[in-house]
Image: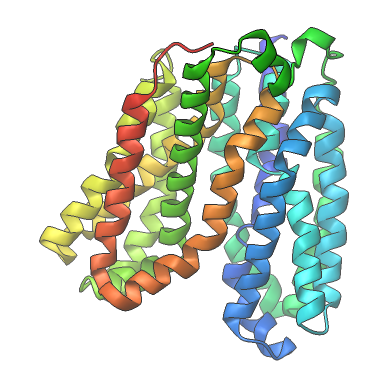
């Protein structure tokens, strides 16, 4: 496709993804407390409903990917906008815990076919093996989802309340994101040989132990990466306070993580774009353990280094979730494979706030040793992956 068409696709999908992330993954951080007060439940219950949605998205992700392999991403992403709108409307109408959980489970259905995995599969369906730069492009734009979403949700909640905020996000899915996704290029019709199932692959090459090993290692990498990322997002202010960091410095450090993520992605797009994605991922995987070690050893004076290293590493590893499966296994059946690989990551993401919170209760700032150890496991798993698989 012409370069101008690719640029338009990146801008369109990047904007739609920004809205999707801001109205789902980043919504509870702002609305969980007022939602819990109004519904007469605890904040923990509000987050548990969100986790239930993530579990639903984990189980349905492979089905959404299979649909993108067969039909292209345009209809799947467009349908996700309608389901997002229904779930957010239901959330705004909830009157108790049953309605809260039901609405988040509907939103979980939308997340299975409306977030990065679906967007990456859409791009691979359009551009095949030559998708690395466009994947990086949409993460550069959607990387600002929290930067846009949190202030907007905060302002809407102060103006309209949490229910009105849900209704506004639902309307934005129908009026903005849906037209954006419907304007994406149509994918070419899939040929039968282009999207073999895992069962067919196994019959054709029953001795392919290395691809299975690589798939398991990659699923482990994604699960541990998302656990660390979600744990840091949920507990960073408390964790920094436990490390002796003052409030103003903690706020500044947290604010640096978003720009550091974008800086890491720009580095991937520029300096590392000709390197194998495994090299980028290995370098990125080492950054969180290094930052955590600096904060553990030096305390508050190292907080900025921690924020920059964690943010940059997390930014590049987000891209790796799309580029590594493509580089290792090729574009065939990419969507379904991506859904399977990311299912453990969704489950880890759902459990991370609770499990890491327990670790902080027991260990305080020492919980960083856990996240650093998990980061080292990510690095070791990436080193064990062969560079040429497909």
Residue 82, position as x, y percentages in the image: 88, 50
Nearer the observer, 152 or 371: 371
**Where 165 falls versus 60 (above or below)?**
below
Residue 116 lies in quadrant: top right
Classify the position of the N terminus by image quarter.
top right
Residue 280 appears anywhere in the view: yes
Residue 149, position as x, y percentages in the image: 62, 59
Nearer the observer, 101 or 155: 101
Residue 104, position as x, y percentages in the image: 75, 65
**Where 350 falls versus 95 (above or below)?**
above
Classify the position of the C terminus by image quarter.
top right
Residue 312 lies in quadrant: top left
**Where 21 falls versus 299 (above or below)?**
above
Residue at 46 percent across and 40 percent down: it is 220
Residue at 77 percent across and 58 percent down: it is 107
Nearer the observer, 312 or 12: 312
Question: What is the number of callouts on the image?
Answer: 0
Nearer the observer, 389 or 100: 389
Q: How is the image coloured?
A: rainbow
Q: Is residue 86 left or right of residue 151?
A: right
Residue located farthest toward the left when viewing the structure as drawn = 298
Residue 385 lies in quadrant: top left
Q: Is residue 171 left or right of residue 290?
A: right
Residue 164, position as x, y percentages in the image: 80, 74
Residue 183 appears anywhere in the view: no
Residue at 87 percent across and 33 percent down: it is 75
**Where 220 falls versus 121 (above or below)?**
below
């Amino acid at each position: 496709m012409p370069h101008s068409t690719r640029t338009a696709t990146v801008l369109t999908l990047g904007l739609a993804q920004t809205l999707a992330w801001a109205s789902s993954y980043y919504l509870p951080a702002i609305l969980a407390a007022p939602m819990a007060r109004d519904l007469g439940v605890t904040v923990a219950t509000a987050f548990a409903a969100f986790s239930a949605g993530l579990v639903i998205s984990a189980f349905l992700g492979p089905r959404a990917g299979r649909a993108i392999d067969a039909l292209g991403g345009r209809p799947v992403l467009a349908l996700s906008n309608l389901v997002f709108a229904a779930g957010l409307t239901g959330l705004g109408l909830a009157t108790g815990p049953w309605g809260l959980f039901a609405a988040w489970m509907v939103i979980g259905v939308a997340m299975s076919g409306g977030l990065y995995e679906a967007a990456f599969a859409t791009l691979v369906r359009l551009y095949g093996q030559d998708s690395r730069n466009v994947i990086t492009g949409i993460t550069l734009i959607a990387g600002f989802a929290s930067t846009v979403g949190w202030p907007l949700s905060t302002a809407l909640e102060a103006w309209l309340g949490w229910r009105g905020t849900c209704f506004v996000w639902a309307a934005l899915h129908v009026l903005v994101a849906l037209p954006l996704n419907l304007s994406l290029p149509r994918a070419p019709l899939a040929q039968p040989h282009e999207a073999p199932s895992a069962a067919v692959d196994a019959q054709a090459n029953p001795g392919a132990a290395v691809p299975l090993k690589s798939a398991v290692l990659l699923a482990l990498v994604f699960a541990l990466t998302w656990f660390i990322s979600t744990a840091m997002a949920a507990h960073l202010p408390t964790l920094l306070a436990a490390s002796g960091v003052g409030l103003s410095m903690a706020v500044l450090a947290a604010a640096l993580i978003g720009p550091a993520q974008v800086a890491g992605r720009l580095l991937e797009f520029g300096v590392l774009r000709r390197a194998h994605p495994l090299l980028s991922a290995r370098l990125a995987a080492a950054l969180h353990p290094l930052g955590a070690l600096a904060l553990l050893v030096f305390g508050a004076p190292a907080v900025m280094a921690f924020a920059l290293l964690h943010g940059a590493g997390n930014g590049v590893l987000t891209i790796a979730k799309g580029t590594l499966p493509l580089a290792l296994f090729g574009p065939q059946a990419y969507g379904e494979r991506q859904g399977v690989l990311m299912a453990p990551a969704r489950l880890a993401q759902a459990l991370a706030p609770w499990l890491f919170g327990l670790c902080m209760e027991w260990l305080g700032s020492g919980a960083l040793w856990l996240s650093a150890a998990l980061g080292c496991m990510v690095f070791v798993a990436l080193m064990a992956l062969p560079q040429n698989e497909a």
